[in-house]
Amino acid sequence: MTEQVTEQEISFTVNGEKKKIVVHPMKRLLDVLRDELGLTGTKEGCGEGECGACSIWLDGELANSCMVPVCQVEGSKITTIEGLSEDARMSTMQEAFKERGGTQCGMCTPGMIMSATYYLEHPEHADNIREALAGNQCRCTGYKKIIDSVKEAFQNL
């Protein structure tokens, strides 16, 4: 006879707010963010950790939220695309994407911005935009406007 896993209380911080939820421990973090917390900026592209649409920061590191079971975020600090804005003002990277037309359908945009901002905050990688975006796929563009957006954000620091 196998024991059935029940829901558990899990506590973590999202975009500076402490959260406590009761959920199945193996539910994907992506689904918890979108369905339980209403943070729909994080998108699901592939569900396999290949496209980067669901990129978030988990304890300061870039992560694909579709690959993280929520039980692994107990006590963690999570930042989503919604957490990049301050006082309802877009971040430098968000503003650059808006100004340079770095978005098309918008599916990959949150993950692109999360990845690009992560590397923006790690200057050792700031020279290589293609490396910064390597884990993110856009199916709409030839990446030129995305790269131009990231370049503009780097210049506006």
Image (cartoon, helix red, strand yellow):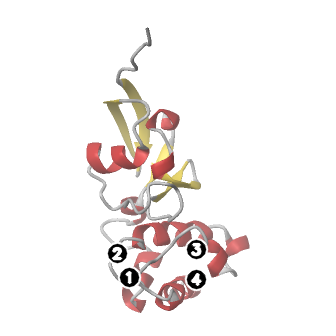
- Expressed as whole percent of the image width and height from the top left, the position of residue 49 reads 52, 56
- Expressed as whole percent of the image width and height from the top left, the position of residue 109 reads 41, 73
- Residue in the image at 50% along x and 48% along y: 67
Q: Vertically, is 2 above or below 147? A: above
Q: Say which quadrant the C terminus sits in.
A: bottom right
Q: Say which quadrant the N terminus sits in.
A: top left
Which amino acid type corresponds to the residue marked 3 in the rendered image? Leu
Residue occupying the far right of the picture: 124
Which amino acid type corresponds to the residue marked 4 in the rendered image? Phe
> Residue 133 has which mark?
3
Please report whichever mark, 2 or 4, sits nearer to the chain's N-terminal start.
Answer: 2
Please report whichever mark, 4 or 3, sits nearer to the chain's N-terminal start.
Answer: 3
Give the alpha-carbon distance from disc 4 to disc 3, as whole Å: 14 Å
Q: Nearer the viewer, mark 2 or mark 4?
A: 2
Check whether the beta carbons of the residues at disc 2 and disc 1 lie within 8 A of each other. Answer: yes
Using the image as rendered, state which of residue 147 and residue 59 is in the foreground: 147
Please report whichever mark, 1 or 4, sits nearer to the chain's N-terminal start.
Answer: 1
SS for dot 4: helix
- Residue in the image at 38% along x and 24% along y: 8
